[in-house]
Amino acid sequence: MKTTLALVSILVVALALPAMAAAQAGDRHPTMKVGTVTVARGQKASGTLDVPAGSDAATHIPVVVIHGVRPGPVLALVSGAHGTEYSSIISLERLIDQLEPAQISGTVIIVPLVNLGSFEQRVAHVNPTDGKSMNRFYPGNMTGTQTERASAIITKEVVEQCDHLMDLHGGDTDESLRPYSYWTVTGNAAVDRVSHDMALAFGLDHIIISADRPKDPNQSRYLENTATTRGKPSLAAEAGYAGTVETDDVNALVNGCLNVMRYLKMMAGEVKMIEHPVWIDPVQAVTSEVGGMFYPLVKRGTYAAQGMVVGYVTDYVGKKILDVRAPLAGVVLFIRAVPSLVKGDTLVSMGGVGSDAKYLK
Ligand SMILES: [Zn+2]
């Protein structure tokens, strides 16, 4: 009797061992399910985030899940909310090709092209289905238009399942932009410290301090802010301009993502943190009071004094109707890349040189 019990005990222990080992390793995600994709450890698979039809059409947003061989953080990489910011989209296409489960501790969820209509029809800034920016309606609403429904699906499937998120952008077809990232200050010191260091690891040498984003997770508006207001340290980054896909811009975004993965201990290798970035605070944009033709006088990245003329506007027969002046002393983050101009368009966005010190607790 005693012998039998002992044998049974040994058997139970032996059977329980693999499960215990997994639990001890802290594997929260033996499998991952994102949209139509279900993957086990060591697998890489693609599918879609299916946004059902509502007051307007359905859309099927592509998603790839790379489920690393070892447990670790879940990192979401998203681009193409603005479907003509091509270099950001191409950078995630490259990472889809490059990243393999054998290299990774944790999981990478890649959503390379949120705004399919914008990409296909070459429409800048908005989703042509409903005329809304796909980075202003988070956390979304399943009874709203396509942008709002897509935002709700991304919040549920991607943001809520990840530990960190990076949202990639660039200058749109009408924006000549120098690369920069954003550090969002939420007021949660622990989250803000990690987001700060993720921006240093991403490596772009100009970092905008966003201290005025919504603090309410139910009114988060921006994708990155949807993650940070849910306690998930994250960032947004921009490189690329005016419809171009330049190698330097794509490399900056790809290498930024890889270096943040090393910082998060998702990949092997030395972490290089940028030591003295230019912290941008505040940012001020100038929108046009008139329509006409725009002529820039400075390039993206130029440093200008407050009041300096950085461009001008003429009517359609060449008569100058407006001088465009720098609203503050600092760097030209982006300047209008095309002559076409209607009232209300952005002419220039400038950043003053600030400091991260007052926001770090
Ligand atoms: Zn964008």
Image (cartoon, helix red, strand yellow):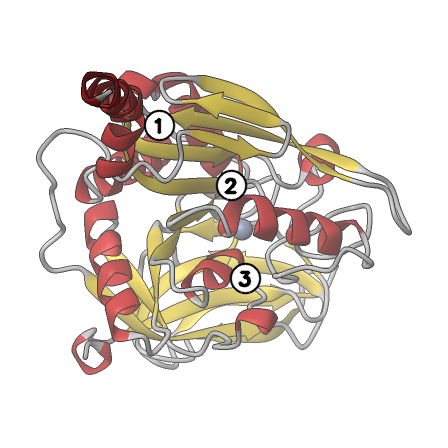
Q: Quadrant of residue 294?
A: bottom right
Helix, strand or loop for disc 3: loop
Q: Nearer the viewer, residue 206 or 100?
A: 100
Q: Reading the chain from its start, which is encountered first: label 1 or label 2?
A: 2
Can you identify the residue that label 3 sits on? 222
Q: Mark 2: give few (<14), some (14-19) or many (20+) Cα within 10 Å.
A: many
Which label lies toward us, 1 or 2? 2
Q: Reading the chain from its start, which is encountered first: label 3 or label 1?
A: 3
Helix, strand or loop for disc 1: helix
Q: Residue at x 51, y 76 (%)?
A: 214
> Quick one: quadrant of the N terminus?
top left
Q: Is residue 205 above or below residue 93?
A: below
Q: Residue at x 19, y 22 (%)?
A: 2
- Where is residue 121? Give x, y as percent: 75, 34
Can you identify the residue that label 2 sits on? 79
Numbered circles on residues, count: 3
- Where is residue 295? Give x, y as percent: 54, 58
- Where is residue 345? Give x, y as percent: 65, 65
Mark 3 and mark 1 in contact? Answer it, CB < 8 Å. Answer: no
Q: Does any portion of residue 83 appear in the rendered image? A: yes
Q: Residue 240 vs residue 100: left or right?
A: right
Q: Is mark 2 within 8 Å of ligand 1?
A: no
Can you identify the residue that label 1 sits on? 247
Q: Mark 3: give few (<14), some (14-19) or many (20+) Cα within 10 Å.
A: many
Q: Nearer the viewer, residue 123 or 17?
A: 17
Q: Residue 163 vs residue 136: left or right?
A: left
Q: Is residue 234 above or below residue 120?
A: below
